[in-house]
Amino acid sequence: MITMPSQERRDYFIRLRPYLKASLVIFGIGIVIGLMINSRFPEIADHFQSSLVSFVKIFRGLSKLQLAAAIFLNNAVKTLAAILFGCLFGVIPGFFLFANGIALGLVFSMSLQSRGLWMSLASIVPHGILELPAVFFGTSIGLMLGAHAVKSLFRGTEITLGAELIRSLKFFCTVILPLLLIAAFVEAFLTSALVSPK
């Protein structure tokens, strides 16, 4: 069983702080661009909406428990990928943040137009307060691993990338996965109930 003592988790979180800030900035820029795309390039927004509808259809017909499992698996795999591919100089987690920021900006903007503020918030906030921090933790780790990869390539560091990767996987298993699991159940049971037509 993979464990990470509480003090080690706290110390690791402190090390992640600058990369968390970077994650929020990249994600925020993506959101702003997503909002701008919907207002200035409606044809792109329409194409994105069609793609989103096709993606959502994959989950139709699932029971709430199956939906929670599918959401959890999808988010866990993508977040783990952002961590592991962060070793490639942080490019992948940076792109992941930027692309998902654009997607959220587009979705929220289109939802505002069709469903209003309350329903738009209800479709994101309940599970988002857990899911987004978990994803940000993952991308922050990816960015940190990328920074270590750059340092080790150009000037060498005392901390090996392998040791950092082991710590990151421990944090993933003890902090990120539980948050994603709870968020998946909240999205499947609570969020879906709030936004489903009565």
Image: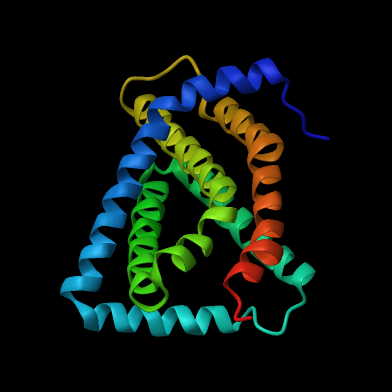
Q: How is the image coloured?
A: rainbow
Q: Position of residue 30 (x, y in %)?
A: 30, 55
Q: Position of residue 178 (x, y in %)?
A: 71, 43
Asked if residue 92 is positioned above or below residue 120 in the image, the reply reads above
Q: Position of residue 110 (x, y in %)?
A: 35, 73
Outermost residue on the right side: it is: 1
Asked if residue 104 is positioned above or below residue 177 in the image, the reply reads below
**Which quadrant, please, contains the C terminus?**
bottom right
Residue in front for this viewpoint, 74 or 85: 74
Q: Position of residue 8 (x, y in %)?
A: 65, 18
At x 26% / y 50%, what residue is drawn?
29
At x 18% / y 76%, what residue is drawn?
41
The reply, left or right, for residue 157 in relation to residue 123 is left
Query: Total label count?
Result: 0
**Which quadrant, please, contains the N terminus?**
top right
The reply, left or right, for residue 24 in relation to residue 68 is left
At x 79% / y 68%, what residue is drawn?
65
Asked if residue 191 is positioned above or below residue 59 in the image, the reply reads above
- The quarter of the displayed image where residue 157 is located: top left
At x 70% / y 51%, what residue is drawn?
181
- The quarter of the displayed image where residue 43 is located: bottom left
The reply, left or right, for residue 24 in relation to residue 175 is left
